[in-house]
């Protein structure tokens, strides 16, 4: 399996307390930055840690020797999945109290929520790692190496800037107005200023455009590292949501960057479920950028282990964990009834286990209520279990960006008035997805018309069917003004079975109370 270098060695990492009074602290461990950056080879080892920070929680197997001591100490992707999915129509959580997800589930959190806090500190921990790398990767610092080595480090430097931009994008999307710090700011007692979303947006846009020449192309890029198209995709996502973030419509820019990705030569994978199995590292035709989870070298109890084991019931008389490559199920969550209702008969994306399960969720934490989602598995293409999930987690990577999302973003941007494409071109891309989804019944059931995709609302439902459990749903619902309002009420929205509107403040998560105390520049609106 060809994956990014898995060395988690990184001397000079930061161990933070739950109260972060300095989001860019100087490392305090035995090896110094001077030691770590003494050789060009070590730069790649550090780069590996920057990537791993998005899907592992610490320096050892399963997140042991943890990077952070903050609340529950959960890893980045376990937090991100919960914040993007738990409060939406895509998840019904089982362990509401045990996992402390009741407030996320019912859209009733506050500034002391442990998941919100863990997510916040994970984001800024990753940003601080990138900043420290960049402080040591300037032209002056790398002048001692050979030209070939300097060329490699310039690529690593661009990737570090991409990863920092990705973390800042998550921060802006989740928290909106946030503390801001780069490698150019002092370390030690520096108190970061509060940046409003427009300032963060402009920083991300500038960064991603500036690194274009230094990111590797798709054909040059090692699997698990970010190619040029990953930066294009992140820009497209940000432009699609610009109306939410900065009250500006940037749909034409979204189309521009979607087309840049398409021009890189990506194609759809023939079989939808193969994008989410243990051999999905082979799907580089469609997967643009992935978190490279590995059951031997990058063991995590979050990310895809959390999704796959969590989706397998541990009290069902019918569901067999081994059928999905799992040693045992965690029974953590199911899907609320509104999502399965979107699918037409014959849609191969409807990957639900229904035997012994009710469609409707009458009781959120009852495992027999709501279908189990079998979209994600730990099976190889040959149908074999890829790893012992009790010992090493799963071997399935998490596709952060894939071509299907690009097609849907382009289509939605066209429907919202963006230029640079056309309804007929957008229709062609949508129907490519539908043809994969419906196969032999595409012509009779799955094919859509220009009139159907003329409305943006078409794309909200289509994105749910194509991208469910891929950490897009909260952001999508907010863009369509349906997350907190009464225009769409799903099961248990707001804590009642029939669903209800909630305060609009829940479109944004609050900065944790601990950091408000530490940084006088920060404050939360409406909380």
Image: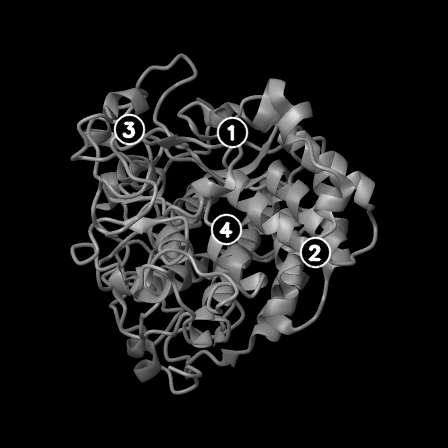
On screen, residue 488 versus residue 365, left or right, reads right
Q: Is residue 104 above or below residue 290?
A: below
Residue 230 percent across, percent down from the top left: 61, 44
Q: Residue at x 51, y 42 (%)?
A: 342
Of pointers 2 and 3, the one earlier in the residue sequence: 2
Q: Is residue 96 above or below residue 463?
A: below
Of pointers 3 and 4, the one earlier in the residue sequence: 3
Q: Residue at x 25, y 21 (%)?
A: 322
Q: Residue 159 or 27: which is nearer the viewer?
A: 159
Q: CA distance from mark 2 to mark 3?
A: 49 Å
Q: Which residue is labeled 3 in the image?
A: 355
| Mark in the foreground, 2 or 3 | 3
Helix, strand or loop under label 1: loop
Image quarter of the N terminus: top left
Visible residue check, residue 269: no
Q: CA distance from mark 1 to mark 3?
A: 17 Å
**Marks 2 and 4: CB-CB under 8 Å?**
no
Residue 493 percent across, percent down from the top left: 37, 62
Residue neighbourhood size for the residue with mark 1, other residues' Cα within 10 Å, grouped as few (<14), some (14–19), many (≥20): few
Q: Residue 59 or 489: which is nearer the viewer?
A: 489
| Mark in the foreground, 4 or 1 | 1
Q: CA distance from mark 2 to mark 4?
A: 23 Å
Q: Residue 186 or 251: which is nearer the viewer?
A: 251
Q: Which residue is labeled 2 in the image?
A: 209
| Mark in the foreground, 1 or 2 | 1
Helix, strand or loop under label 3: loop
**Marks 1 and 3: CB-CB under 8 Å?**
no
**Marks 1 and 2: CB-CB under 8 Å?**
no
Q: Which mark is residue 472?
A: 4
Helix, strand or loop under label 2: helix
Q: Which residue is labeled 1 in the image?
A: 345
Image quarter of the C terminus: bottom left
């Amino acid at each position: 399996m060809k994956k990014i270098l898995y060395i988690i060695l990184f001397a000079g990492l930061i161990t933070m307390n739950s109260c972060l009074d300095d989001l860019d602290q100087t490392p305090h461990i035995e090896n110094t930055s001077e030691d770590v950056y003494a050789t060009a080879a070590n730069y790649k080892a550090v780069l590996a840690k920057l990537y791993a920070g998005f899907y592992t929680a610490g320096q050892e197997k399963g997140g042991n020797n943890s990077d952070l001591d903050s609340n529950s100490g959960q890893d980045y992707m376990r937090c991100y999945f919960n914040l993007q999915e738990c409060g939406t129509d895509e998840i019904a959580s089982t362990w509401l109290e045990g996992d402390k997800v009741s407030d996320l589930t019912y859209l009733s959190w506050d500034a002391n929520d442990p998941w919100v806090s863990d997510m916040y500190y994970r984001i800024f921990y990753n940003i601080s790692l990138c900043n420290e790398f960049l402080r040591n990767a300037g032209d002056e610092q790398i002048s001692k190496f050979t030209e070939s080595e300097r060329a490699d480090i310039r690529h690593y430097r661009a990737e570090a800037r991409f990863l920092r931009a990705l973390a800042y994008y998550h921060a802006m999307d989740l928290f909106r107005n946030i503390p801001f710090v780069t490698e150019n700011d002092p370390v030690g007692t520096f108190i970061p200023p509060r940046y409003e979303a427009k300032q963060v947006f402009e920083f991300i846009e500038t960064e991603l455009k500036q690194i274009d020449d230094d990111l590797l192309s798709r054909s040059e890029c090692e699997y698990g590292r970010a190619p040029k198209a990953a930066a294009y995709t992140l820009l497209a996502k940000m432009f699609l949501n610009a109306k939410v973030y900065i009250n500006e419509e940037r749909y034409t820019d979204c189309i521009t960057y979607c087309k840049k990705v398409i021009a890189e030569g990506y194609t759809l994978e023939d079989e939808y479920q193969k994008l989410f199995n243990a051999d999905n590292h082979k799907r580089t035709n469609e997967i643009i950028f992935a978190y490279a989870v590995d059951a031997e070298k990058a063991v995590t109890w979050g990310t895809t282990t959390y999704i796959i084991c969590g989706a397998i019931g541990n009290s069902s008389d019918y569901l067999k964990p081994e059928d999905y490559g799992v040693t045992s199920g965690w029974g953590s969550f199911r899907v609320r009834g509104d999502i399965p209702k979107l699918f037409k008969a014959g849609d191969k994306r409807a990957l639900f286990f229904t035997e012994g399960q009710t469609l409707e969720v009458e009781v959120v934490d009852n495992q027999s209520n709501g279908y189990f989602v079998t979209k994600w598995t730990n099976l190889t293409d040959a149908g074999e279990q890829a790893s012992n999930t009790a010992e090493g987690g799963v071997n399935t990577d998490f596709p952060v960006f894939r071509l299907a999302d690009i097609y849907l973003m382009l289509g939605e941007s066209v429907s919202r008035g963006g230029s640079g494409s056309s309804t007929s071109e957008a229709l062609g891309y949508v129907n490519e997805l539908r043809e994969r989804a419906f196969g032999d019944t595409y012509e009779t059931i799955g094919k859509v018309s220009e009139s159907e995709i003329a409305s943006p609302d078409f794309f909200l439902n289509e994105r749910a069917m194509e991208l469910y459990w891929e950490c897009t749903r909260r952001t999508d619902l907010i863009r369509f003004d349906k997350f907190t309002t009464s225009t769409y009420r799903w099961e248990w929205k707001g804590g009642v079975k029939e669903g209800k509107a909630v305060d609009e403040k829940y479109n944004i998560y609050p900065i944790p109370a601990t950091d408000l105390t530490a940084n006088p520049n920060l404050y939360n609106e409406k909380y």
